[in-house]
Amino acid sequence: MRKLFLPLLLLVAGCTAAPSTGSSQPDLGWLFTSKGNVKLSTKVKTTGNTTFQLFSDLTLMEEAPEPVLTKEVTIGPDSLLTVKLGRLAPGFYEARIADSIRFNIGIRPEEVTSPTDALPDFDSFWEKTLSEVRSMPMDAVFTEVPEYSDSVRTCYEVQYTSWGGATAGGIVSIPNAPGKYPVILEYMGYGANVYYFDPQAAPDVINFLVSVRGQGLFKEPQANWFDRGLESKETYYYRGAFADVQRAIDFACSLEKADTEKIVAQGESQGGAFTMVAAAIDKRIKAAAPAVPFLGDYPDYAKIVWWPVHEGLDAAAAQGIATEDFYKVLSYFDIKNFAPCITCPVYMAFGLQDQTCPPHTNFSIYNNLGSAEKHYLCVPTCGHAMWLEPVWPPIRVEFFKKVLGID
């Protein structure tokens, strides 16, 4: 897997994150949103003469990618590197300094173009799948978890029947006082471990940590979900997993204390993808806050990093599945093909240095959204671990409060 060597740099802009609501967003460190010539200024822990190169991210998996720009630069005693990059096309680029320091920059991300490629039966395929899961009895079983329950909220481990008879469920924390409460659905990352909610943390909210089949509460030792059932769209793992995303919404709405007019979704990585799917397939989701969403724009994904698409290609080849057929199957599970169906407000967070769900794949989804209201948060120095960035949770909370009209 290609490694990113993020140096000890200081953003000259003097900040590490900022939200965007459109073209008024100022340039931020290594993210440039204004038009015109680009000048990169950053501090590097080195001095002297060296070579600076810039590569389009869509060429990084090539054996010998051609640089977009090569310049000889001098880094002075103050360690300040200043490079005039000129006019660059919208997209994301990898900067290399003497091939030992590497970091990403972004140019006008809201102009990144990656058209949807859904096949003609995309909608009917999902309508059939989701209608099947909706027609099934849920048979939910609640098991109280006393150590995470108190007089304020009660915690339960839940399991219920989902599409194909599989078991799904999660962890739900429900206020004890009478009334109706907003619901926050939290979808989990790929192979992430479950955790339990502090009952005192959100006394006026129902929290539901969703576990899809084979993950979360039901985590299996074999973790290669991406490669499962590649032979057809009918058998692919994420058909069932996306059905479980829908089942979680049905479960939330079945709760006696749920305010079904105030349901929101959040998640990071695979959870970000599930959050997008939830908003696309069910209008009961009133707002979505995905971070570093996974499973988007597979053809371009494969041009930037090795995992997961190349792992999938290897698995498909071992099964005698042609590359063209592999990508056809994945098109039914590409989040950018769900994006036009999302009309609720969306706030997306991404790390500019992400090598697991690269920024290009995030904006392939974001720029295809059907939402009239959408925002993004960039943390320039962050990789994939947006959940460790303290700036993100309060922004997400305020976003949900505003959408739901909560003080």
Image (cartoon, rainbow, N blue to C red):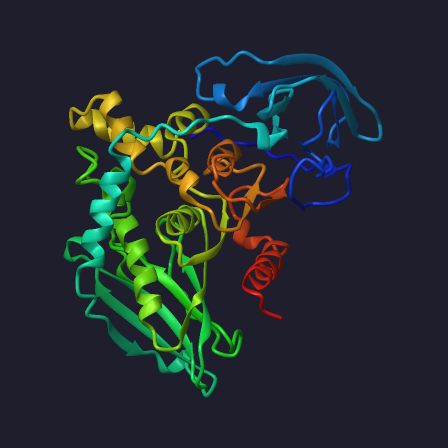
Q: Position of residue 319 (x, y in %)?
A: 16, 28
Frontmost residue, 320 versus 287? 287
Residue drawn at (48%, 51%) of the image: 344
Query: Residue 318 is drawn in which quadrant?
Result: top left
Residue drawn at (17%, 39%) of the image: 234
Query: Residue 260 is drawn in which quadrant?
Result: bottom left
Height in image: 357 above or below 347?
above
Frontmost residue, 240 versus 145? 240
Height in image: 94 above or below 187?
above
Height in image: 398 above or below 139?
above
Q: Position of residue 381 (x, y in %)?
A: 63, 41
Number of callouts: 0
Residue drawn at (62%, 71%) of the image: 407
Farthest residue toward the right?
Answer: 77
Q: Position of residue 245 (x, y in %)?
A: 32, 54
Q: Position of residue 227 (x, y in %)?
A: 25, 38
User: On the picture, is 53 further left or further right than 265?
Assistant: right
Query: Residue 26 is drawn in which quadrant?
Result: top right
Farthest residue toward the bottom?
Answer: 151
Residue drawn at (30%, 66%) of the image: 251
User: On the picture, is 140 further left or further right than 361?
Assistant: left
User: On the picture, is 188 further left or further right than 389?
Assistant: left
User: On the picture, is 228 further left or further right than 250?
Assistant: left
The N terminus sits in image quarter? top left
Frontmost residue, 24 versus 343? 343
